[in-house]
Image: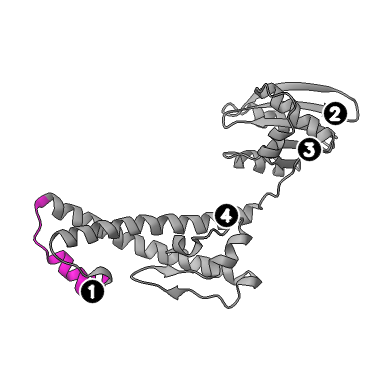
Amino acid sequence: MLIIGCDYHPSVQQIAWVDRETGECGERRLTHSGGEAEQFYRELKKGISVRVGMEATGHSRWFERLLAELNHELWVGDPAQIGAKRVRKQKNDRRDAEHLLKLMLENNFPRMWVPTPENRDVRQLVLHRHRLVGMRTRVMNQLQAIALNEGVRRKRGLWTEKGRAQLESLRLPPWTTRCRQELLELLDRFDPSIDQLSQAIEQEAARVPMCNGCKPIPAWGRSRRWPLCWSLAPRVGLVAANRWPAIWD
């Protein structure tokens, strides 16, 4: 088996490896932009088992997909525990790669759970909806401010048909008029997108047994709270916080 300790960075990676069968070892610095790293892993001997160990980090999806395509085993470690196991505090890419390799050889590598690609995709669905709802909320708050500055205080009623008509009928200065018009256009674009994402979340939740029976509950205004997210979130690797219900509005 070929064991590789990989100190991964977005543009480059430093690796240290050892072949347990032949005892051959070495180190190398691989760049990503020119395809050097991909070429290195594709040219490894066929038929030999490869295990790559790296710290948990971001911007590494392409690398994980590459290793999965080549049937190479990937271990992802807890950075805090890996750092705590380091005896020498002097730190650089070369030493980091050697340290990862050493932990793997000693069976002391603090391996972490890694979500599957399917789980990650569902996580993106949930987070994308959450971000769009946040953007819509900021647009709605700006429209509320415009209405309040003109003496119109309708709160939730501003988003009814009568409230919308009153908001559009306000006589405003030219630039404020343009601001109102563009904000209303943005609001009209957000609603269908968020509704589609909400339906997609319901479909994903229906596939999870623990989410059966959970349905969206209408909340104030255009928002909708999602009790199903309490069950769906652990499935996709999201951890519930104390303010969990608020972030799904």
Report the disc number at residue 121: 4
Quarter of the image with the N terminus in it: top right
Amino acid of disc 4:
Asp
Element marked by disc 1? helix
Alpha carbons under labels 3 and 4: distance apart? 25 Å
Q: Residue at x 51, y 59 (%)?
A: 126
The amino acid type, in three-letter code, at marker 1 is Glu
- 75 relative to 152, above or below: above
**Mark carried by residue 19:** 2
Query: What's drawn in magenta, residue-wise?
Result: 158-174
Depth check, mark 4 against mark 1: the one in front is 1
Instruction: Tell me the amino acid under the disc marked 3.
Output: Arg
What secondary structure do most residues of the magenta stretch adopt?
A: helix
Can the viewer see residue 157?
yes
For the residues labelled 3 and 2, the Cα–Cα distance comes to 10 Å
**Mark 4–mark 1 CB contact (< 8 Å):** no
Badge 2 element: strand
In x, y percent, where is residue 156? 28, 70
Q: Mark 1 — residue?
A: 161
Q: Is residue 15 left or right of residue 2?
A: left
User: Residue 182 placed where, x, y %?
Assistant: 23, 54
